[in-house]
Every structure is written in structure tokens, then in C-alpha cells.
Image (spheres, rainbow, N blue to C red):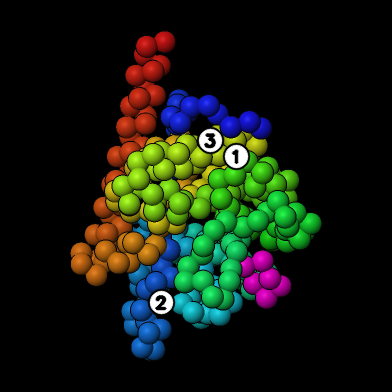
Amino acid sequence: MTARASAKPRRLKGAPPIRLGINIDHVATLRNARGGRNPDPVRAAKLAVEAGADNITAHLREDRRHITDEDIARLTAAKLAPLNLEMAVTEEMLSIALRVKPHASCLVPERRQEITTEGGLDVAGQVDTLTPFVAKLRRAGIQVALFIDPKPEQIEASAKVGTDAIEFHTGTYCLAATKGNRRRSERELKRLADGACQAAGLGLEVHAGHGLDYDNVGPVASIPEIVELNIGHYLVGEAIFVGLAASVARMRTVMDRARAKLRHSDTEASLET
């Protein structure tokens, strides 16, 4: 499938609402810095849901640097909201996911040395590995997403392995926007919009996340094919100053405002025609 020529998001009449997933990993990071049970990621998840989150994301890394197996067990038992389990493509993580059976799983690349996830999964280079891995999760009733860069070959490969959804790594766009590099941020935003259109055309649900904040989230939330954003580190940081409920609620408002503008432009376009 060829990329679209325009940088502007395609106007879809009746664009769906956009979901907000809150990643609670770095509540656990703070807890683990000292040990013990506080601050409690499950309490954070409860506050996030009450403030407008639609689902909770937690990355159970192989080195357990933040979220732990006990956290996943407690989140599953609490049933606060659909749980999105971020995980590496390993037999250990597959076994855990099949036992816990979260609502969804997002397969991510993982390196022990990295501070945070540095880029998307190379789906195109791992089709033979990922196809049976994805199939096992889906047979267990788990919705599967692949965390990828917005590249046509990765999107096509994602459809080939049979996943339900893809989640675009938005870090490059966010970094350019934060640095005030308008040309670069517009180019990266176009890649996201084009990729979202391509993925939706292949029957994939489109999510996005990494590095999103109040200032840069609006243009991403305005891409009509994107139906879910997963955000964590920034909101946990903001919570130090305003509280977690307030930080989540404000993000919910910013996202919904961007989506409302999109629907308004849809209505105007339909009236003009």
C-alpha cells in the first residue's frame, strides 16, 4: 500500500472516540527505588481509572526493573479496567500471559541496557517467529498489538503475522516537537498519519504512544484512525506537582478536545458537500 501524499489527517465521518491507556510502570519504579509497597501501582491504577483512563498498561520487563509479577497478579485480581500487558517476545513472557490472560498484550522490543524502549519491533525481520507467537496469544482470547515504528514495511508485516492492532512509537515525533523542530515534527506527524491510514486499510486497529505530553498529544489524537493512546512517564511526573488524578484528567480533556475538533471539521465538511 502506498503512503498518502497529504500530511493532513484523513477526515473520517463519525471518527470514533479515542481511548486513554495509562502506563503505571514508573509508579513501580519509584517504589522499587526504596523497596516496600509504596507508592502502590494498583492504587495508581484505581486513581487513573477514576480520572478517566480507559485501560491500564504495565510492562513486565525481563529484568523486573519496575513492574513485578506480583503487581500483574494484583492488577488482574483488582479488575479495575482492561489490562494491557506489555511484554517481550520470549517463552517466559508467553507463559505468563497465557496464565494471567490480560485483556490485551503489546509485544515490544527489549534490551537490558536501555533506559526505556528505544524503538519499534522489527516485525518484518521476525515474521516466522512472531506469527505462531501471536497466534498462541489470540487463541487464548488475548488481543495482540505490536509496538512498531510507522514504516510501511513494518505495518505490512504486522498484518501478515495476524495481529489485531499496532501501536506506533511516537518518540521521534515527540522529541522533534519538544525541541521546537517544526519541520521535523511535521514530517514525523505525516509518517504517523500515513501509517495509520495504511494500517486501518489493512484491517488493523491503530494505537500510539511514547513521549506524549499535554503540548504534543493534540495532533496525534487528531489522526482519526488512531483509537488509543498509551501514556505513562509524563503523567506520573506531573503527578508529583498536581496529583495523579489531576494529571490524568487533564490529559483526558486535551485528547477529547482534539477529537471534538476533528468531529467538528467532519460535520462542516459534510455540510459543505
Packing grade of label 1 (10 A; few <14, some 14-19, many >=20) is many
Q: Which mark is residue 199?
A: 1
Q: Is residue 234 above or below residue 204?
A: below
Amino acid type indicated by mark 3:
Asp
Q: Considering depth in this image, is 60 or 19 the residue closer to the camera?
A: 60
In this view of the protein, can residue 158 be seen by the observer?
yes
Q: Which mark is residue 234?
A: none
Dot placed on the residue nearer the N-terminal end, 2 or 3: 2
Q: Residue at x 24, y 59 (%)?
A: 246
Amino acid type indicated by mark 1:
Ala
Quadrant of image for the N terminus: top right
Q: Looking at the rendering, which quadrant does residue 220 occupy?
A: top left
Tell me where residue 170 appears, x and y as whole percent: 46, 51
Spatial CA span between label 2 and label 3: 35 Å
Q: Which mark is residue 194?
A: 3
229 horizontally vs 44: left or right: right
Q: Which residues are magenta?
A: 88-93
Spatial CA span between label 3 and label 1: 9 Å
243 horizontally vs 102: left or right: left
Q: Considering depth in this image, is 254 or 56 the residue closer to the camera?
A: 254
Tell me where residue 60 appears, x and y as whole percent: 54, 72
Tell me where residue 124 appears, x and y as whole percent: 70, 51
Q: Residue at x 61, y 54 (%)?
A: 146
Q: Considering depth in this image, is 63 or 125 the residue closer to the camera?
A: 125
